C-alpha cells in the first residue's frame, strides 16, 4: 500500500529537519574544533614568546655582567648602555629590550624599615621623601601629607599618622579598599594612595622607584643625570640645593668619580655640605645594585610586553628579583 501524499510530506519534512539538525551539529563541532586548534596554537605561541623573553633576560644579564666586570662593579654610563633600545631578530618576529640603571631613583619603600608584617615608619626615609617633594615644587604641607600617606600605606599598623590615612579613610570612598600593609611592588601603586592625584603622580614618577628593600635610598653618583638632581638634593635633605646638585652632576668626569671621596672634593660642593657628618656618604655609591629590563616579544602575530628587575650581588652575580608579563607603566 502506497503512503498517502500527506504522509510522504511529513516524512520528507522530518528528513529535512534531521538533516538541518545534523548540519547544525556538524557546524558546532567544527567550530569547537577550529577554536580548540586556535587556542592550542595561541597557547603554543604565547609559551614560545615567554621563552624568548626569558632568553632575552639571559642576554641582558650577560650584558650587565660585562658592564659590572669592567671595573669590579664600578658602574658608569660609559658606552651608552642604559636605556639603549636593542632589537634581536627571531624567526617570525623580533625581541625588543633595553636595560635601565636603577641607581639614580628614590626608593619609595625607604620610608619604612623592618620585616614583613612588622614594617614601621623610617623617620629618615620619610623626611627625605618629603624633601624630594619639596624639591619638586610641592608646598611643604602637601609634602608632609603625601609622605605620611605613603608611610601609612606600607606600615603594618592601623594607626594613622598626623597627616596620613589608614584603612578607615579608604573604606569611606566610593570604591572602598584597604591599605597595602606591605612594600610597594611598583611605582604605579602610588595612584592608589590618598592625595597622589594624576598631576602629582606625573610630577613624581620620573624620580622614584619601588625597590624590594625597606632601606634608605642609595644612589650611584656615576649614573645620575642632571635631571636627577632632585633625588640627590633629597638625600642631602636640601642642604645641597637642586640647582647646585644639577651643576655638580653635570661636572662629573667622563669616566665617573672613582670614589665617594672624589665626589665630595668637588669644588662646587660648599664646605658646609662637604664637612664630616654633613654628607650622607652611606647613601652615595659608585656602583648600582638594581637594573630594570623592559621590552616586548613579537612572535607569530603576538605582542608580549615584559619587564623585570635584576639585582646584582656584591660578587657581581645577577638574579631576577621581579619578572612581569607587562610593561613598567
Image (cartoon, helix red, strand yellow):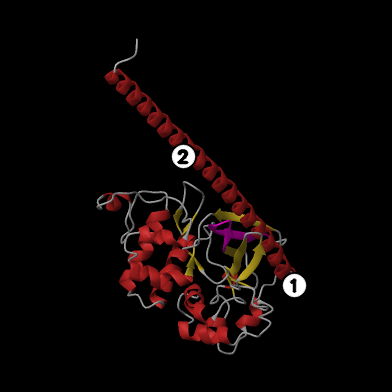
Farthest residue in the top direction?
A: 1
The image shows residue 36 at horizontal and vertical percentages of 52, 40
Given residues 325 and 319, the one toward you in this image is 325
Inspect this view and state whether residue 143 appears: no
Identify the secondary structure beneath mark 2.
Answer: helix
Farthest residue in the front direction?
A: 1
Earlier-in-chain disc, 2 versus 1: 2
Inspect this view and state whether residue 87 appears: yes
Residue 287 is left or right of residue 140, and the answer is: right
* Magenta-span inclusion, residue 106: no
Residue 11 is left or right of residue 116, and the answer is: left
- Residue placed at 42% from the left, 53% from the top? 155
**Bounds of the magenta span?**
295-313
- Residue placed at 63% from the left, 52% from the top? 51
The image shows residue 318 at horizontal and vertical percentages of 68, 59
Up the image or down, 55 lies above or below 282; here it is above
- Mark 1 residue crowding within 10 angstroms, few (<14) / some (14–19) / many (20+): few
Label 2 – label 1 distance at C-alpha: 58 Å
Identify the secondary structure beneath mark 1.
Answer: loop
Q: How many marks?
A: 2
Q: Which mark is residue 33?
A: none
Up the image or down, 158 lies above or below 271; here it is above
The image shows residue 256 at horizontal and vertical percentages of 66, 80
The image shows residue 128 at horizontal and vertical percentages of 45, 69
Q: How would you classify the magenta stretch by its main secondary structure?
A: strand
**Residue for badge 1:** 70
- Image quarter hosting the N terminus: top left
Given residues 175 and 37, the one toward you in this image is 37
**Residue for badge 2:** 31
- Residue placed at 51% from the left, 41% from the top? 34
Amino acid at each position: 500500500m502506497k503512503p498517502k501524499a500527506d504522509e510522504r510530506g511529513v516524512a520528507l519534512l522530518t528528513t529535512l529537519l534531521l538533516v538541518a539538525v545534523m548540519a547544525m551539529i556538524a557546524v558546532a563541532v567544527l567550530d569547537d574544533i577550529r577554536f580548540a586548534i586556535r587556542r592550542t596554537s595561541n597557547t603554543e605561541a604565547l609559551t614560545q614568546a615567554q621563552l624568548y623573553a626569558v632568553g632575552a633576560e639571559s642576554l641582558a644579564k650577560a650584558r650587565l655582567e660585562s658592564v659590572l666586570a669592567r671595573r669590579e662593579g664600578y658602574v658608569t654610563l660609559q658606552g651608552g648602555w642604559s636605556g639603549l633600545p636593542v632589537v634581536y631578530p627571531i624567526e617570525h618576529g623580533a625581541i625588543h629590550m633595553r636595560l635601565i640603571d636603577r641607581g639614580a631613583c628614590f626608593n619609595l619603600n625607604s620610608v619604612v624599615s623592618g620585616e614583613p608584617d612588622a614594617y614601621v615608619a623610617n623617620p629618615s626615609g620619610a623626611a627625605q621623601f618629603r624633601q624630594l617633594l619639596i624639591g619638586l615644587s610641592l608646598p611643604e604641607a602637601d609634602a608632609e601629607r603625601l609622605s605620611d600617606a605613603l608611610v601609612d600605606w606600607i606600615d603594618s599598623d592601623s594607626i594613622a599618622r598626623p597627616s596620613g590615612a589608614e584603612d578607615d579613610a579608604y573604606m569611606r570612598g566610593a570604591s572602598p579598599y584597604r591599605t597595602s600593609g606591605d612594600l610597594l611592588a611598583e611605582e604605579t601603586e602610588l595612584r592608589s594612595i590618598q592625595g597622589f592625584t594624576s598631576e602629582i603622580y606625573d610630577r613624581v614618577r620620573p624620580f622614584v622607584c619601588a625597590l624590594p628593600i625597606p632601606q634608605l635610598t642609595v644612589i650611584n653618583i656615576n649614573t645620575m643625570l642632571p635631571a636627577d638632581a632632585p633625588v640627590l638634593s633629597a638625600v642631602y635633605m636640601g642642604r645641597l640645593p637642586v640647582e647646585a646638585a644639577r651643576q655638580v652632576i653635570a661636572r662629573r668626569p667622563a669616566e665617573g668619580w672613582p670614589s665617594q671621596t672624589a665626589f665630595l672634593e668637588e669644588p662646587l660642593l660648599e664646605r658646609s655640605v662637604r664637612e664630616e657628618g654633613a654628607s650622607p656618604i652611606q647613601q652615595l655609591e659608585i656602583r648600582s645594585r638594581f637594573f630594570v629590563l623592559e621590552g616586548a616579544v613579537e612572535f607569530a602575530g603576538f605582542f608580549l610586553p615584559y619587564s623585570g628587575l635584576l639585582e646584582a650581588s656584591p660578587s657581581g652575580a645577577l638574579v631576577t628579583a621581579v619578572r612581569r608579563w607587562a610593561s613598567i607603566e
